[in-house]
Image (cartoon, rainbow, N blue to C red):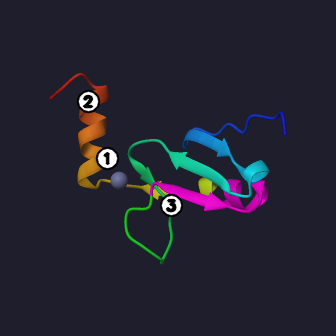
Amino acid sequence: MKDKFRHKNILHWDDERNIDNSLIVSLIHGMRFDTQEANNVHVMGFDTVVEAMSAVRKAIKCDCVACLKEGNKLNGQK
Ligand SMILES: [Zn+2]
């Protein structure tokens, strides 16, 4: 799979399916996956690109402590 999947919500896209793992998708700071399974899910594994992109598109804003902290770092604050 040569294609790089790009979306404004994606921080990191890691395709580890060739080593029997999953597609690991990390969202940018300030966004999280909209899932009932856990709170504040910023990184998730998927079996298919379709599933991954669907979840990425449905990502919601996150204002958890970690996101706020990272956001502040990016803005040059401490
Ligand atoms: Zn967060």
Q: Is residue 46 magenta?
A: yes
**Would you name the residue on which mark 3 appears?**
33
Q: Check disc 1 and report its element: helix, strand or loop.
A: helix
Q: Nearer the viewer, residue 1 or 33?
A: 1
Q: Is residue 29 magenta?
A: no
The answer, for residue 53, to whether it is visible in the render is: yes
In this image, 15 relative to 28: left or right? right
**Would you name the residue on which mark 2 appears?**
73
Looking at the rendering, the stretch of residues picked out in magenta corresponds to 42-54
Q: Which residue occupies 77% across, 59% down?
A: 48
Task: Classify the position of the N terminus by image quarter.
Answer: top right
**Ligand 1 within 8 angstroms of badge 1 C-beta:** yes
Q: Nearer the viewer, residue 25 or 62?
A: 25
> If you read the primary sequence from the N terminus, does the residue marked by circle 1 or circle 3 appear first?
3
Q: Quadrant of residue 64?
A: bottom left
Q: Which mark is residue 67?
A: 1
